[in-house]
Amino acid sequence: MISSDDRVTGNPSFEIVIPNWNGAKMLGDCLNSLSGQSYQNFMITVVDNGSTDNSLGMLARDYPAVRVLSYSKNRGFSAAVNAGIRKARAPWILLLNNDMEVEKNCLLKLLEGMVDFPDADFFALKMYNFYNRELLDGAGDAILRGGVGYRLGVMEHDGERYSFDRLCFGACAGAALYSRRFFERVGCFDEDFFAYVEDVDLNLRAARAGACCVFLCEAKIYHIGSATSGSKFNELTIRLSTRNNINLMVKNYPGRLFLRFLPAIIVYQCIWLLFCIKKGVFVPWFRGVCEALSPRSLSLFYGKHREHSADMSREELRLLGNRIVDSEREAVASIMARRNENGRSNRLLRLYLKLFC
C-alpha cells in the first residue's frame, strides 16, 4: 500500500475515512460537501482500492489536503476502511461511502450527539435517497434471525418515527461514526468478507461485547446507493451477499443460537433463493453458496467462531438471541410501515413475516 505525504496537523475531532474504487466524480461531490461543513475540525483520508480512472490524479490536483492511501488492486471495502482506521489520529472515526453528499450541519450534529450520549460507542447517521430526498435510505440498522441486516426506514418517507434519537442494534458502515475505543473493544472489520455483510458482522460482534449504538436523527447524508457495484442486484452483489450471509452465521451463531433460529434461517434462505431465481441471478447465488460451503471457507469462519463465539455462556447466548429478536421486530415494524405507505410489499418477505414474526 502506498501512502501520500501526511499533511495534517493539530488535533482533529473526526477522522473521515472514505473508501474509493473508480469513483472520481462521486468522490469529488462527496469531498465538496465536506468542505462546506459548518464544523471544520476534521481530517479526511481516502483509501483508493486500485482505481483505474482518474481518482488519484483528481485527488492530487483538486484536494491536496486530503490524505490518500492507495492499493495497487481492489482489496475490498473491509481492507480499505481498516487501513484508514489504523491510520486515524482522531478519537472519533466517521466512515462514508464515496457516493454521498453530506448535509452542511452533519458533523456539528454528530459532535452534539457525542455530548448528549457520552456512553455511546458508535452512531448511525440518517440516510436519505440522493435522488428523492423525501425518502429515507436508512435510519439505523437492524438484523433478522436469518443473519441478514436491514436498514430501518429504507424507502419510507421521513416522519415522526425517525424524528428522534434512539438506541438501535447497529449502523450501516456506509455512514457511521465510531469511537476509537469501539475498535479497541470490538475489533476492526473482517477482511475475509471483502465486501457486503461486513457491517452486519461488526454489529453482531458489537452486540456481543455490549457496545451501545445510537441513531442521530439530525446527522443527515444523501446516498446514491450501489454506485460502485453498478446496481443492487448485479452478479457480484448477489454472489458476495449470499456467500457472506452464510459466512456470518458460521462465524457468529453458536450451536444453541443456530438451533433456536434454524426454522427462520431455512425459510429465509429459501425465500432468498426464490427471489434470486425471480430476478434471473440463480447462477451467482449458486456460486455464493458453493464458495461459503467450500472446505476452505468453512474452516476459516468456523475457526473464527471457535476463537470468538464458542465460549459464550448460556445467559450470554440468551441475551444475544433476545437482542436479535428485538431487532427483527423493529425491522418488521419498518417493513410494515413501508408496505402501508406504498400499498404493496414483496410477497416473499410477507411470507417470512407471517411465518416467524
Image: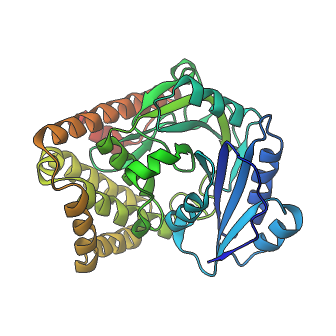
Q: Please tell me which residue lies in front, 119 or 324.
A: 119
Please indicate, yes or no, whether residue 146 appears anywhere in the rendered image: yes
- Left or right of 60: which side holds 267? left
Judge by depth and name the residue closer to the eye, 122 or 226. Answer: 122
Q: Residue lying farthest bottom?
A: 72
> Looking at the picture, how far across and down is residue 314, in whole percent?
11, 41
Which color mode does the image show? rainbow
Q: Is residue 144 visible?
A: no
Seen at 41% across and 63% down, the residue is 190
180 left or right of 357 in image: right
Q: Position of residue 235 (x, y in %)?
A: 48, 69
Image x and y of residue 53, in percent: 75, 75
Identify the residue at image location x=23%, y=68%.
Answer: 303
Instruction: Say which residue appears at 30% left-offset and 50% top-offset.
Output: 147
Q: Is residue 154 above or below residue 290?
A: above
| Looking at the image, residue 307 lies above or below residue 93 | below
Residue 312 location (% of width, % of height): 17, 48
Vertical relation: 292 (above or below) 65: below
Residue furthest front as drawn: 10
Name the outermost residue toward the right.
61
Decide if residue 174 is on the left or right side of residue 148.
right
In the rendered image, which quarter contains the C terminus? top left
| Residue at 74% across, 58% down | 27
**Quadrant of image for the N terminus:** bottom right
Determine whether 309 is above or below 6 in the image.
above
